[in-house]
Image (cartoon, rainbow, N blue to C red):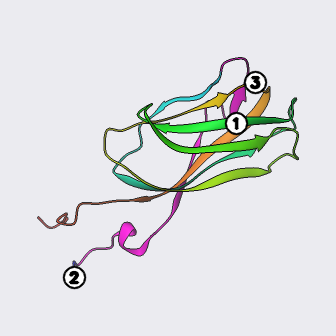
Amino acid sequence: MPNFYDDSKYGVIERFEFRAHQAGVIMTGDSTLIKRHYPKGPIFIKKLGIRHIATQGGTEVTVKFLLDETVTLATMVASTDSTPWAIASVAVTHKCSAGSYINASALGTVATGSVQCFMDFVRLYSSNWNHNA
């Protein structure tokens, strides 16, 4: 057994909040919520979700998270007239290798308002990594 602490060995889950602004992502006529986010990888994605910051116009919006704009990670329907700080999330089990990026877009009619997208993940390290080497 290695003589160093490894977060991934103990399954420490971290949360990353995608923030275009301090308050969150502002949904407007543009369907792109996250253009490109390059996580410090490799990571193992556990959950993707949206947290509503304020009550918004419309009834619902479908959000799609993609890996490298080709692999669908999650698709979720978020009620945009729900109470502030309500969460819509989907459990994901996908590895994101170093150099890959994540993007998200709203499908169909785009509601207006503020949301905060987030990702729960576990860091992955090489099995032969050793800080004493």
Q: Residues within 10 Å of mark 2 (few under 14, many from 20)?
A: few
The answer to whether the residues at label 1 and label 3 have Cβ atoms under 8 Å apart is: no
The residues bearing labels 2 and 3 have C-alpha atoms spaced at a distance of 53 Å
Residue drawn at (72%, 46%) of the image: 51
Can residue 23 be seen here?
Answer: no
Which is more N-terminal, label 3 or label 1?
A: 1
The mark closer to the camera, 2 or 1, is 1
Which element type, helix, strand or loop, lies under badge 2? loop
The residue that mark 1 highlights is 62
* Residue at x-position 22% and y-position 82%: 1
The residue labelled by disc 2 is 1
- Relative placement, left or right, of 17 versus 9 is right
Indicate left or right for 81 with 7 as reference: right
In the rendered view, tell whether residue 92 sits above or below residue 101.
below
Q: What residue is disc 3 on?
A: 109
**Residue 98 numbered tag:** none
User: Taking 132 as reference, is 98 above or below it?
Assistant: above
Q: Residue furthest left?
A: 133
Magenta-drawn segment = 3-30
Is 1 on the left or on the right of 92, as rendered? left
Q: Amino acid at mark 2?
A: Met
Q: Earlier in the sequence, mark 2 or mark 3?
A: 2
Residue 102 image position (x, y, % from top left): 47, 37
Foreground residue among 69 and 126: 69
**Place of residue 75 in the rendered image (x, y in percent of width and height, measured from the top left):** 61, 43
What is the residue that sits farthest to the top in this orientation? 29
- Assign a secondary structure to mark 1: strand
Q: Residue at x 68, y 40 (%)?
A: 116
